[in-house]
Image (cartoon, helix red, strand yellow):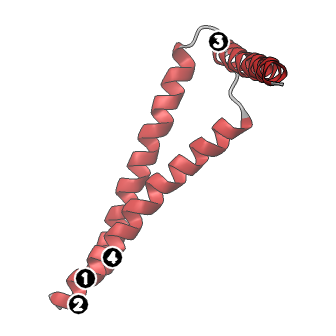
Amino acid sequence: MTEERKAKDANDETLFSRQVAAQAARKLRAQRGGRKSVWFGLGMSGLIGWSVTVPTLLGAALGIWVDKHYPSPYSWTLMLLVIGLIIGCLNAWHWVALEYKEMQEDPDE
């Protein structure tokens, strides 16, 4: 009984290792071929979206805090929101420029 189980476990292990090896080979071929998947594009758009959203929201939150604790005739919320938006757009531009540079340097594409 134990020999049958050992043989079955060894067979399952070999099948699993073959599946993992095949998946790794597909990923390596895709990387060498320079093909970007749909998931890469979605991930990049998410990265760019968050790189704009986070500084904008942080600027707005800081502006609300400043307006609450240090009242002034100027709206710090609006000013810091715009500054956060500008910083976020510059950040997104940086990410896109890096990706574009990487695409231009790759001779396979």
Residue 61 numbered mark, or none = 4
CA gap between label 3 and label 4 equals 44 Å
Tags 3 and 1 in contact by the CB under 8 Å rule?
no
Residue 65 numbered mark, or none = 1
Q: Disc 2 residue type?
A: Lys
Q: Disc 1 residue type?
A: Trp
Q: Along the polypeptide, which appears first: circle 3 or circle 4?
A: 3
Tags 3 and 4 in contact by the CB under 8 Å rule?
no
Q: Disc 4 residue type?
A: Ala
Q: Is residue 60 above or below residue 47?
A: below
* Residue drawn at (49%, 55%) of the image: 50
Tags 1 and 2 in contact by the CB under 8 Å rule?
yes
Q: Along the polypeptide, which appears first: circle 3 or circle 2?
A: 3
Q: Is residue 37 above or below residue 67?
A: above
Q: Nearer the viewer, mark 3 or mark 2?
A: 3
Residue 68 numbered mark, or none = 2
| Quadrant of the drawing holding the N terminus | top right
The image quadrant of residue 86 is bottom left
Q: Position of residue 16 (x, y in %)?
A: 75, 23
CA gap between label 1 and label 2 equals 5 Å
Please tell me whether mark 1 sits on a helix, a strand or a loop: helix
User: Pointer 3: what residue?
Assistant: 32
Q: Along the polypeptide, which appears first: circle 4 or circle 2?
A: 4
